[in-house]
Every structure is written in structure tokens, then in C-alpha cells.
Image (cartoon, grey):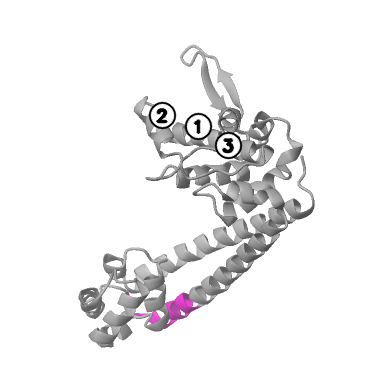
Amino acid sequence: MVPEGDAAYLRRLNNARERHIKERSALLNQLQQFVFLIFPEFTRIIKTIYSKTALYILKKYTTPAKIGRAKIEKLGEEIRRRSMGKFGAEHATALMNFAKTTIGIQEGVEGLVMDIQHVLIQLEMIDSLIAELEHEMEITLLRIPYSRKPLSIKGLGIVTVAGLIGEIGDFTKFKTQSEIAKLAGLDLYEVSSGKRQGQRRISKRGRSLLRKILYYAAMQTIRKNGIMHDYYQRLIGRGMKSIMALVAVSRKLLRIIFAIVRDDSEFILNHEFQNKKEIRKAA
């Protein structure tokens, strides 16, 4: 089934966002390589190169020489604010000490500085584009009355719900949840061989992006206090591998979403629907 109207628009928005996310990942990999060449000790203090704190320091100071000449009090306060208290003066001191004794390359540094600055500019541009796309997703969802139903599920945000509707289209046009599972490639088939008699696997013949969205949604809902945490733990307790348990959570999550849209119900925090009839339909 091909999405129409606002659902088709959401699909375009989600595809554009996916492209920008991939571009951003590639740029961050480049940035990490450049920083490693010029200041390999940097990540010993700030391990995540794509954190706000790291990006701020690289934009303002860039080179080990500039970091080494910074005032400890000022740098400490700057990284404290950017990291919301995670880093402070002691980290600024350690970073400055490493900067003064770095084993990074000393020749051709100006070229690497330019590379780093260009990557940072591109990252800011991509972040702006992603934010614009996500804002447009939110506005579009307001025009789709049933979108508030999956949004009532703890762990499902604007991007996830927009992606689901963009890939699935109008939920109400499906008669059964198995039709949507097939669209996602989450329908099961039996594997029969000498060693694997009776094993069941998902077909993966549907839309790969829809499976990806459901997979990441499942990861959000299995966290502590998440709506699928207990269910996931029971599966793991039975000896199921984590990847297979996440697939099972994805399938169950899809059943719940389909049920609350179909029955025009809300998902509430105590893991139940508004009445027992809806619980049975979603199970």
C-alpha cells in the first residue's frame, strides 16, 4: 500500500532525515579522524567527539596550541556549562596538559584546522536541516487525527510516529495487524532443515526502513520503566537472544499501535488500555 496525502509527505520527510543522519555520521567520522591526527589525546578527556562540549571546544579552540594557551578558569567554566556539570576545572586542566605535550602531528596543521572548521560548519548546517524536518513532521502529524494515539505510548516520539505513518500510510485501511507486519517484513516463516527443524524467523521482505524504525522504538521501550521492559526481560529470561527479543518486542509494539489506532483508544502509563476488551485485541 502506497502512502497518500500527509502520510506520503511524512515519508518524504523521513527519507530526507535519514539521508542527513547518514551524512552527519560520515562527517563525524571525518572529524574524529582529523582530531586524532592533530590531538589524539583529546578523547581521553572528552570521549564522545560529537558531544556539545567537544564540538564547542573544537570550534572555539581547534588546535592543541590554542587549548594549551587558554585560561583554566575560563575553559573550565565553558565546558562545565556545555556539559551541564559533567566536566569542570579538573577536566580543563587535564585537557590543557595533554595539549601542551600532545604527540599529534606538528607539520601541516593549518590544513587540518581548515578541514576541521569546514566539517563543523557542515555539521551545523545538517543539524539545522534535521531540526527543520522534525519541526515539519510535528506540524504534519497535527493534521492526522489518529497520530495522537501512538504518541500516547511512552517511548514513541514525533520522529518515530512520523516515520511509522510515513512508511505504513493510513493504519485504518489495514484489516489485521498481520498485514502491517508483512509490510514491515516482520511476518514469520518456518525454517526447516536437518539442524534447524521448526525454527521461525522474520521474512525481512517488507520495508527495511519501517523495520529499523520499529527496532529503535523497541529499544526505547525496553529501558528501565519502559512499557516493554518487563516483557523483554521475560524473553531474555527464557534464553532468547537479545536481537531476537528485540524483534519480538517490535512485533508486539506494532500490534499495540495497530490496536489503539483501530479502536480509537489511548495507551496509558500503567501498561493497559482503557478497557479489557482493548487489551485482548492488542495481545
Q: Which mark is residue 248?
A: 1
Residue 240 % position (x, y):
40, 27
Mark 2, residue position:
235
Label 3 environment density (alpha carbons within 10 Å; few <14, some 14–19, many ≥20): many
Q: Is 189 in front, or is 63?
A: 189
First in sequence, mark 1 or 3: give its number: 1
Look at the picture and state if 201 lies above or below 130. above
- Distance Cα–Cα, label 1 vs label 3: 12 Å
Q: Is residue 257 visible?
A: yes
Tell me the quadrant of the picture where the C terminus can be found: top right
Q: Secondary structure at mark 3?
A: helix
Magenta-drawn segment: 105-117
- The kind of residue on which mark 2 rests is Leu
Q: CA distance from mark 2 to mark 3?
A: 18 Å
Residue 70, above or below 165: below
Along the line of sight, the residue nearer the viewer: 82 or 260: 260
- In percent of width and height, residue 2 lies at 77, 44
For mark 1, does the 10 Å Cα neighbourhood hold few (<14), some (14 to 19), or many (20 or more) residues? many
* Tag of residue 12: none
Q: Residue at x 59, y 62 (%)?
A: 20
- For discs 2 and 3, the disc positioned in front in the rendered view: 3
Mark positioned earlier in the residue sequence (1 or 2): 2
Q: Secondary structure at mark 1?
A: helix
Which residue carries the number 3 mark?
Answer: 256
User: Which residue is painted at 41% across and 29% down in the image?
Assistant: 235
Residue positioned most to the front: 275
| Magenta residues, dominant SS class | helix
